[in-house]
Image (spheres, helix red, strand yellow):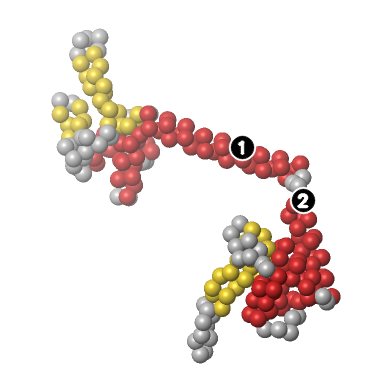
Amino acid sequence: MELIKIEKKNGIETVNARELHEFLESKRQFADWIKKRIEIYGFYENKDYYSFSQVCDKPQGGRPSIEYYLTIDMAKEISMLENNDKGKLARQYFIECEKKLKMPLSLEEMTLLVVEGQKQKIRELENQVGRLIHSTKTYTATEIAKELNLKSATELNKILESKGIQYKQNGTWLLTAKYSECGYTSIKQEELDSGRIIYNRHWTGKGRDFVVELLSEGK
């Protein structure tokens, strides 16, 4: 049962002082109550509590209110100082909250954390391997055409030609000057048994991404 909400501030489990004040049913004004507690009992800001300015809509304007968030230890002490049933109840509640926060993880919880951590590492490794393979792999025009649901490499080449991306010279498709230095293609020279030399062009991973993105946008 949650009597008073526990929430993290600056990485620390804290209690909203205004909510605690309301729970304790103190008769004093909140601002006077919290300031006196801090002053008289020597609580330190950023150690025992954290304060934040909060702008509130008021008909007559006015200064921003200050919200105080207390560590559980400070909340326990303040509750005890009230010296009433509500104070005792709140103090016991905070003691139980501390016990739960300090309770070690069960074997099952620890196993789940380890498993999730390993899964994340595997996913990261797979992504790295995938990026590495993609960056070194080359693609034929036929492979890219199939990916784009085109009929053939011939259709793909004609589309790229019409867009001013490539042109044909001596039977080999070459990129136009605008794209020739972008690392989109890899051309390898091959000598046939007949002695004839041909040039095989493949798209790099970067080139494949460029073509797929370009033609996907046009659909």
Q: Front-most of 17 and 82?
A: 82
Q: Is residue 8 above or below residue 216?
A: below
How many residues crowd mark 2 within 10 Å: few (<14), some (14–19), many (20+)?
A: few
Residue 85: quarter of image: bottom right
Residue at 52% from the left image edge and 89% from the top image edge: 59
Q: Which residue is mark 2?
A: 103
Q: Is residue 96 left or right of residue 205?
A: right
Residue at 67% from the left image edge and 84% from the top image edge: 29
Residue 188: quarter of image: top left
Residue 118 — which label? 1
Where residue 35 appears, as percent x and y from the top left, is 64, 76
Residue at 28% from the left image edge and 34% from the top image edge: 184
Where residue 190 appears, as percent x and y from the top left, is 25, 16
Where residue 78 appears, as percent x and y from the top left, is 74, 71
Q: Is residue 128 above or below residue 45?
A: above
Residue at 67% from the left image edge and 60% from the top image edge: 13
SS state under label 1: helix
Nearest to viewer (mark 1 / mark 2): 2
Q: Residue furthest bottom?
A: 60
